Image (cartoon, grey):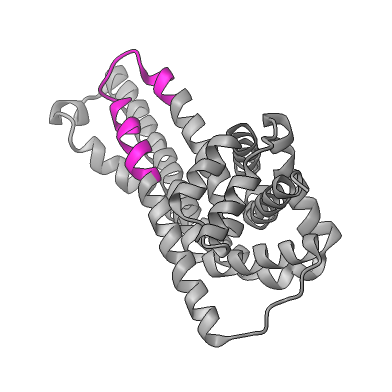
Amino acid sequence: MRVAAKSASAVVKSPLGFARGLTYAFRGARFVYFQHPKLARYWVAPIVITGLALFGVFYGSASYYDDVGGALWSLLPQSWQDASGWVGGLLTALRWLIELTAGILMTLLGLVVVVLLSSVVAAPFNDALSEAVERILTGGAAPPFSFGRMLSDVARTIRLEVLKVLVYVGVVGPMFLASFFIPGVGQVISIVGFALTAVYLGIDYVDWPAARRDWSVGDRVRFVRNQLPAVAGFGTGVWALLFIPLLNLFFMPAAVAGGTMLFVATARSEN
């Protein structure tokens, strides 16, 4: 552990800026998709899994938005539902709006769930991809295959991902709920929520090399504190990729590679 702490101390001495950190999300995409296409064996499976989950979200929202909207409409006074004439026309339009809103909210909620859980499902694949990217960057030799090591890595990465997801939901979730009940602070909460999301995404994808080095929580906190502009910039880049239609399906391998590249580049700045 002293070796890990010493490594962490060395890594955090040369912080990078927000703008440079931002570029690593796009550098990661170029690295895995154009410069090293053979890395596809690590990221094809997570993309297929995520793609099926996204299909389920959109299919479910399109199939059941009217049922959910109808259930919400049934909670309104019976006189509204029995109205006729121009009033009935307005209320019919209101029902359509409620159903549309229900569909949008169902889709957004489903996307959030997919984003949060896809990192857990894809954890073993992402760890292997990050390790392969680091070997290419550093020129290190691949470790010999070990079934026990593979099982240990899977258990470790899934445990860490579940913990990070729970921490994120525990912090951002109450803020999101508060925005519905505290007048006038919704915009502030949205800005703070975005900042926390950007930092979370940055930490999530930079953390793979740190996990392989068995860094303690203190080591990781010190790294993030000293590299916060770069981590936040990188997380913002990941967020941008996440919300580009179609490209968002391929954002995870790019984010894993970009986070690993940012970590290695930060470490190399001391050499």
Q: Position of residue 150 (x, y in %)?
A: 54, 79
Q: Nearer the viewer, residue 259 or 265?
A: 265
Numbered range of the magenta stretch: 168-190
Q: 197 above or below 271?
A: above
Q: Is residue 71 magenta?
A: no
Left or right placement of residue 109 versus residue 247 in this view: left
Magenta region, mostly helix, strand or loop?
A: helix
Q: Is residue 176 magenta?
A: yes
Q: 249 above or below 38?
A: above
Q: Nearer the viewer, residue 267 or 94?
A: 267
Q: Nearer the viewer, residue 102 or 171?
A: 171
Q: 161 above or below 139?
A: above
Q: Position of residue 9 (x, y in %)?
A: 59, 46
Residue at the spot x=17%, y=35% of the render? 75
Residue at the spot x=80%, y=70% of the render? 38
Q: Position of residue 116 (x, y in %)?
A: 45, 52
Residue 62 seen from this side: no
Single out the residue that lies furthest toward the right: 35
Residue at the spot x=80%, y=52% of the render? 30
